[in-house]
Image: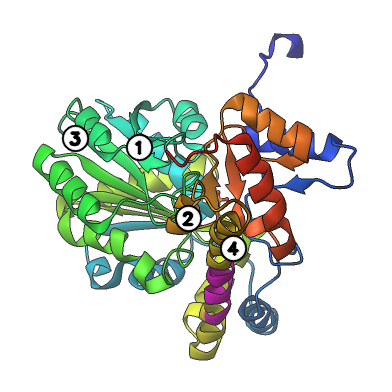
Amino acid sequence: MFEHVEDYPIDPIMIGADLFAQDPRQDKLNLTVGIYQDEQGHTPVLEAVKLAERRLVETQASKSYRALTGDAEYCAVLGYEVLGDSFDSGWVAAQTSGGAVALRVMADLLAQMPKPPTVWLQSPTYGNYVPILNAAGSRFQALPYYDPLRSVLTFEQMLDGLKAARLGDVFLMQGPCHNPTGADMSEDQFAVLLDVLEARGIVPWIDLAYLGFGQSFDADCAMARQIADRFSECIVCITLSKTFGIYRDRAGALFVKTRTQDQERITRAVTAIVRSGASHAPDHGPAVVRTILQDTDMKALWLRDLDQMRQRVTRMRQRIVATEQEVFGTERLSYLGRQVGMFSLLPLSLAQEAALTRDHGIHVVQGGRINVARLGESDVQWLVKAVCGLLPTSDG
Ligand SMILES: Cc1ncc(COP(=O)(O)O)c(C=O)c1O
């Protein structure tokens, strides 16, 4: 029977990780990883997380099932933290196993509608959206968001493409620290986008994966808050994997804002979809998050460490720009200093990308994504010399 199973595609990030593992050289650099790492290449457990875990060990009285939509208190605490006062009414909320399951539950819900909407995507974007939407059977289309070779947003083209969207379609966008581009819309562009979505009756779906890695946790919630304030129907997916450094503990959430008359039906739909797919979300990660957010001291510790993670990434970005200036006197990578978050794309052709690995031992995700948070101070020269050696010498 199993001989009939077709070959499934392997995620490009996993291919990158495999190729890195197979590279026999000692001097090799793995920029394919999707997690934050400190200067020593570690992904530490945050102090606030350890404290919250200790408290849970001492106080947790039961491990019985929660509701299918998880711990209502976690959803409420997180909802208010991220969305502010606009979380007061109209929301259907579910605790999910990380961000991927929140996305999948929503994709299922859209695909199961009698007249499924088209989901419009930024391209390039998070590599798992297409597999998730495909698995759910959703209809989707990509819109040009960023030109990797010129390292610029293609905002006007994206808006132009959106003209083909119909009333009731959905636009899936990322919050701050866009993965894989590191290029976010300006405030003005975002305002224009929301005008277009509102005028055309397109429902915004925002995916927040890097809260705290852009400007600050609070400032990074602004995009979602603006959407929540303005739209009577919208979707917010959250993963706390990076923000709390609790990747394997799978803390996430799905928030759907509905009109009052739809709320109970959407609650039942979300509950049924959760039941038939992921079922109950794991509770440990979300319980840690709730404990931290509800305790002033732990919250301050967590925000301190989150700020430090963000500052390290910003420092590495600035070091790249300064190193190119010092070594080459050029600004071909200066865009990296204007971008935010862990990821950015190198402006390399596939042949140049292959040369980066072959000749310099630097591994990137196919398509040029690097994880800036993987770089140590001593890696920056290596990267800059290798990349600039592959790029044309003129800035133009
Ligand atoms: C934009 C985006 N959304 C969602 C996710 C999924 O997060 P999780 O690992 O918590 O499922 C990621 C993870 O890298 C991401 O980058």
Q: What are the residue bounds of the magenta stretch?
A: 304-313
Q: Nearer the viewer, mark 4 or mark 1?
A: 4
Disc 4 + disc 1, Cβ < 8 Å:
no
x then y, percent, for residue 6: 66, 13
For the residue labelled by badge 3, is the local secondary structure a helix, a strand or a loop? loop
Indicate if the residue with disc 2 has its beta carbon within 8 Å of ligand 1.
yes
State the separation of the CA atoms marked 2 and 3.
25 Å
In the rendered view of the protein, which quadrant contains the N terminus?
A: top right
Give 127 or 327, whichever is nearer the viewer. 327
Q: In which image quadrant can residue 229 be found?
A: bottom left
Q: Amino acid at mark 1?
A: Tyr
Q: CA distance from mark 4 to mark 2?
A: 25 Å
Per the image, the residue denoted by label 4 is 319
Task: Give whichever of 270, 175 is nearer the camera.
Answer: 175
- The residue mark sitting in front, 2 or 3, is 2
Which amino acid, by three-letter code, is at mark 3? Answer: Gly
- Real-space Cα separation, disc 4 to disc 1, in angstroms: 27 Å
Q: Say which residue label 2 marks.
A: 209
Going from the N terminus, do you reach mark 4 or mark 2 first? 2
Residue 168: which disc? Answer: 3
Q: Residue at x 9, y 42 (%)?
A: 199
Residue located 69% across and 84% down the image: 58
The Cα atoms of the two marked residues, 4 and 3, are separated by 45 Å
Residue 266 x, y percent position in the rendering:
29, 47
Alpha carbon of mark 3 to alpha carbon of mark 1: how far? 21 Å
